Image (cartoon, rainbow, N blue to C red):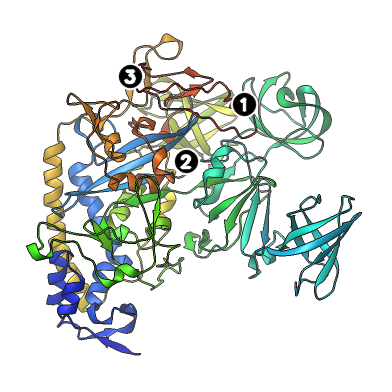
Amino acid sequence: MPRRRSSFGTSFDNSFKGFSDAVLKKEKSNQGDYTEIPYQFVPIGREDDYSEIRFYDFDSTWCRWRRGYELYVITQQYLGSSATGRNTRGDFRMFFTFQYFPGLFVPVRIFTFPSAGNEEGEHTVGIRDANSLNLYDLGLPIDSVRYVTAATAGTYNKSGTTVVVTLVNHGLRVGESAFLDYTSGTAVDETLTIDSVTDDTFTCTSSASVTTAGTVNVRQEFADTTEGFADTRWTEQRVKIRSMPTPVTLLAGERLVDRVVERDSGVNSTYSQSGNTVTVTCSSAHGLSTGNQVFLKVTSGNTKTGLYKIIVTSTTEFTAESIISATASGNVKVQRRIKGFDFNNYVGNTVTGVDLTTDEILFKRDESYGVQLVNNKPKTVTPAHRGFLAEQDRFLTTEIRYQCNCPDFMRRRKYNLYKDTTDDRFPNTGIESVIPGTRQDREGNVIDSRDNPGVFNDFGYAPTGNFYQVPEYNDDPEGSFGGLLYYQTRWCKHIYAALWSMKHDEGNDQFSFEGRYQQDGPNVSITIVNHGLLPDKRVAIDFTSGDLLDGQYIVSSVPDENTIVIVYPFSGTTQGDCTVSNLKIHEYVNTWLLEPNDQPAGNALDKFYKNFEKEQERTRKAAERMSLLGYGLPWTGNKDIEFGQRNAPEEIAQFDPTLVTMKLTDTIRRDNGELSRDGQLLNNAATTLMSMQKVLNLDFKLIEDVRIGLVNQPLTDFTPDFQFGEVEGGVYLNGEPETGAGVSSMDCSTYNPGVEQSINVDAGAYLN
């Protein structure tokens, strides 16, 4: 194996001006330890300034994993609190709700970790929770999946139902399928089976008869089968859903997974529709109540599949109102809405866009991953072992997004004006700054430069050792800062610490009770000694015996200290044992936190632990300082208002101006010393806003602190009737609306959440 010799000279020192003195000193002190460096530890073009110690200190996944766990333990020890203690003492994590537009709120978490560095004293990790946009809530399961090749332009001539496509050297064969995307003429896009071929043409038979000609984009299509997925020729996976809601059109670059499932297998039924009224007759007792929401999966007839609110007319019949008037009848499966998660078998892919003409979400083949059972244990595999599953009652949902403001995760090093000599205070960066790449300014403009001299410059290198066989980070314009991929295995220690916290704490209100349940109609009474739960608490229930299905439920009432009651989606009479616990929607990250396999060995491991002990001590001191500064300061969460819905006192999300939310958007404004959104702008940086832009996947201009509310537990733990700052039909539903200069009026009179089609709502800023 070829080897490289490490040397540290003047050229090395000059190229790293502004880099941390401690790091530079460590590099020089270790140069004699390893005079010969294994080739795999040396990036091409950097042979003269790299070492094995540097590799393990800065590029080893195991080192970051180990540091992240210790950082979490220390931070939890000094700054952690219980859910109730957070209101009086504070914590290192906060929970937010961000309003994308009226009616759509997503959960966000912020973690603040102590740092021994003198520049900031802390590092911040922002995480947008998984399932922030869950198509289960919209009643949109995966309808179908297909795999297609890249488009190739050709021409076509259609006479009646016969389509002749001219495409030089197309390489297609009789019996294969071609997806024809007509770009001119009057033909309608369709997938057809090839009847005959020549070298430059192929012929298909269409279902619609028309005479036309024009241009066409041709894609070979593969069936939604194991063989189709395994074919190496397809480049795009297209997932069809029933309709395309507005939020989905904003998800380019997002990772979607299919881990959400419907627990209820459904009741086979028939239906008839007259006008807008749909009457459903079930083959057995449905157990539903008036006002329940069901999913009607129509298998024949013209009535639309979707979510419906029902009116019960008998034990086997109910009616529902459709938004479309029709006369129809046929078969339907009634699903009674019990949401569950499959953490042992799911896959994730990156969205590239949507096709509104076919209601398909488009995914690229690269950068997929999945989880499957190996020896009865869930294991993360890359690339994905399968495509998305259709016709299995699976729903797409968003994966977590995360961002840290530390130089390590952002692959940047800061320029230190205080430590550099006077001669070097004029900003300069090394030759690595000419590597192709982009960055984005506060206004969202893409700048064809990787560096911002005087502020930071780029590390210029990411390791290519693919220990997990995950998609590699490519150091090119598409993979640089402007389009940085989030799903990298090489997380910084702060992101590891945040994931450890989510695995162990979630909303920091953990409980797990064993109980006995009795169902009487839709009501299920659960006996748990001294449970301490309150009404409207969202819980996870695992029914270990009896006929009820596991899932997420809401505590509807608490008759006494030893009993809780939930409302099951349908009636019955059964009893058995169960386990009631807090929601843990991120428990699957446990498979991400398994120990990486690139641990240092020999002298390198000894050196790591020698430095690690010193780092731990510095982290403890930094945590102690943060604890002393923050101790006694109450953590700001929900807000109580005197007149809420029905003129009753109500707890709502906190949307008032706060220093925390203003810091997240780098827009601190004050009026006579008090925080005011109409005051003078005192901070107009983009450091933290840049992180929030990555977490929320939104343009800078759309991230305003007026849209960020604080809550005292994860947003997913709240019941649907909790108010977040909701506006419906121009009426402000909660909070304390204000009027005056600088306040925009919200015209939402055209917004109707009951309308199936996508509607864009222009809603200006509002005060809560």
Q: Residue 766's spot in the image, x, y percent? A: 40, 24
Q: Quadrant of the N terminus?
A: bottom left
Q: Earlier in the sequence, mark 3 or mark 1?
A: 3
Task: Evaluate whether residue 668 shows in this view.
Answer: yes
Determine the CA span between mark 3 and mark 2: 25 Å
**Label 3 neighbourhood size at 10 Å, few (<14), some (14-19), many (20+)?**
few
Q: Amino acid at mark 1?
A: Gly
The residue positioned farthest toward the top in the image shown: 647
Q: Element at badge 1?
A: loop
Determine the CA span between mark 1 and mark 2: 20 Å
**Label 2 neighbourhood size at 10 Å, few (<14), some (14-19), many (20+)?**
some
Q: Residue 123's spot in the image, x, y percent? A: 24, 50
Q: Earlier in the sequence, mark 1 or mark 2?
A: 2
Number of numbered discs on residues: 3
The residue positioned farthest toward the bottom in the image shown: 1
Q: Residue 558's spot in the image, x, y percent? A: 42, 21
Residue at the image position 86 percent from the left and 55 percent from the top: 206
Question: Dot 3 corresponds to which residue?
Answer: 640
Residue at the image position 64 percent from the left and 19 percent from the top: 290
Q: Foreground: 33 or 445?
A: 445
Q: Earlier in the sequence, mark 3 or mark 2?
A: 2
Q: Foreground: 494 or 265?
A: 494
Question: Dot 1 corresponds to which residue?
Answer: 754
Give the side of residue 36 with respect to residue 381, left or right.
Answer: left
Question: Dot 2 corresponds to which residue?
Answer: 132
Q: Which disc number belongs to residue 469?
A: none
Look at discs 1 and 2 and give the one toward the viewer.
Answer: 1
Labels 3 and 1 touching (C-beta < 8 A): no
